Image (cartoon, rainbow, N blue to C red):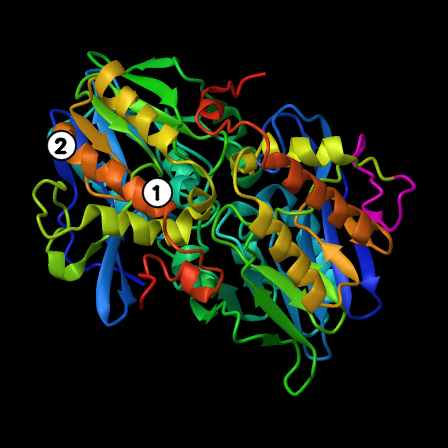
Amino acid sequence: MSITTSNPLPRELADGLYWLGACYAVPVGGRSLHANNSVFLVAGSKWSALVEAGISWDTRTILGQIRDLTETRGLPPLRYVFVTHSEQAHSAGVGHLLAHHAQASAHGDVTDLHMVFPEHLERMRFADPGDRFDLGGREILVVEGLFRDLITTRWFWDSGSRALFTGDGISYGHYHTDSACGMFIEEAERVDVPQQMKFFGVSAFHWTKFVDIEPYADRLDEIVFDELHAELVLPTHGLPVTDPAATMPKIREGLIAMSQSTRVDSDAAFDIFVPEDE
Amino acid sequence: MHGLTLTLVPDRLFALVNPYELDGRASSHPLSVRGYSTLNCYLLRGRARAVLYGTGYSVHEDAILAQLSELVGGRTLALAIPRIEFPAMCNARAIVERFDVDVAYQRLPESPANFLNLRPKYDVDDPGKLRDVRLGQIKTTEPVTIDPGDARRLRFLVPHLRLLPSNWGFDEGTGTLFTGDMFSWVWRDTPSGPWLVDDEADDPTDRGRVEDFLLNNRYWWLAGAETESFRDAVADIFDRYSVKAIAPDHGAVLTGTAIPRHRELLDEVLEMAADLPATGVSVGQRSLIS
């Protein structure tokens, strides 16, 4: 596993909304499969915020990208770090981010983080659906965590860009040969979203094989289309969705495929994204 | 709160038990539970080498280093990081800086220097002695030998009953089954425990507690799910391995008649859960703030 050497990130997704991090590559069956542990930077007129804090091996990259964007774009100071849940891939960067940004505090699902980063004990707070955080001219709204690892998971919403941050929801990688690094999913024509979601599900979302996934898919459509009228859907482990009307049907197909994938209880279950036939 | 070292098998296996308060902030238990649990690390000690199974939460760093200082002696350590969550990894760097560690067995195939250097007390640009620690890929087909040439091996399993990508372990030398977040449901009113349960006496666990532990937390998805395969898979593990102790990441170590009793409690809850209405969509709307 390695961080790819040519990194097209950060990328500005909308006014004041930046996609940070890097692809990492996993050799799978003779091919190079890429995935992201994305972090998003949202800049208001008074404050900036991060959604997700990143996996440990990306922390140096994330800190550098924030520093560079702040300097070159004149962004306001980082005030909030929003954490979808306390798994390493989503919150390992909290410790260094709070250490480097004295005005920042972490919010969302911060379970366990008081025992992981005790030096920041007073700067981490739970947040519930409906809680709002003002950045100046835009706000971050806490949203129910629909598709999750941990029961305490939170999703987030940026009012300024109408972006929904879905954490583990809607996870998929792409092959190196798809030439999709740093792209929106709508720009990456070669990526087979349902198949990639199925691969990811085998590794990371074992539980989906034992439940009725349809209610989750229905509720996702309600949140995206009926309640929030989202213009962007931004998963942590997938490429940004910039045309929900066109792409969400593929996402639904992927959720169904994930739930119908074969049970794998061997090392292959953790060869992230390994197709079942390899 | 003080840590405790339990000798599970003299000279060979020790539990480093460090309590924490269940106050609505721990992902190990339902947020509504009050009392105390523990984060357990296990030292599999051989003659010249030892394996530390899990490295614990940062908040227990001083206690764990002190516990290891009493036990490790001049042995070379291997670290086993069987989960991709924090309980397994927070003190890896601190342990590597203090002791002679040559390999870290991980689920994710990333170098320990990149994966385990997450604490802000250390320079993010300098992984220190983690740089010298070799990656050992956890594989079910490649058990870890504690001492070279010794028959005692630590075998890794992929449990069918799991939430996140994680492994269980089995110490063939002592018959100890390491079960991660499963069987982690013994909690107490005080941090002093006891943290070893070998029969029904002084065991507060009943079916209601196991049900609460699983369905109101990490195994929320079992309600209304197909659970027969999990019942079969758990039974299969205990058929295949002669389990003399269940060693979870949290709470009491189970031995003696506690083993069949807790297996039965799990089986009953799994059977019952299949007939419950699914709650998977609505649980995401619950409050985190008590």
Q: Residue furthest bottom?
A: B149
Q: Which mark is residue A242?
A: 2
Measuring from the top left, give residue B70's x and y in whole percent: 76, 62
Q: Nearer the viewer, residue A210 or B46?
A: A210
In this view of the protein, can residue A241 be seen by the observer?
Answer: yes
Question: How many callouts does the rendering have?
Answer: 2
Question: Quick check: B161 left or right of A1?
Answer: right
* Vertical position of residue B97 compared to residue A21: above or below: below
In this view of the protein, can residue B179 be seen by the observer?
Answer: no
* Circle nearer the viewer, 2 or 1: 2
* Vertical position of residue A162 compared to residue B143: above or below: above
Quarter of the image where the C terminus of chain B is located: top right
Q: Range of the magenta residues? A: B188-202
Q: Secondary structure at mark 2?
A: loop
Our reading of the magenta stretch's main secondary structure is loop
Task: Name which quarter of the figure residue B38 lies in.
Answer: top right
* Vertical position of residue A109 compared to residue B53: above or below: above
**How many neighbours does mark 2 have within 10 angstroms: few (below 14), some (14-19), or many (20 or more)?**
many
Disc 1 marks which residue? A54
Residue at coordinates 41% horizontally, 49% vertically from top-left? A204
Quarter of the image where the N terminus of chain B is located: top right
Q: Nearer the viewer, residue B221 or B216?
A: B221
Residue at coordinates 76% horizontally, 65% vertically from top-left? B13
Residue at coordinates 81% horizontally, 61% vertically from top-left? B8
Measuring from the top left, give residue B86's x and y in whole percent: 52, 46
In the rendered structure, does residue A274 fall within the stretch colored magenta? no
**How many neighbours does mark 1 have within 10 angstroms: few (below 14), some (14-19), or many (20 or more)?**
many
Query: Which amino acid type is marked by label 2?
Result: Thr
**Callout 1: chain:** A
> Spatial distance from mark 2 to mark 1, Cα to Cα?
22 Å
Question: Quick check: B113 left or right of A224?
Answer: right
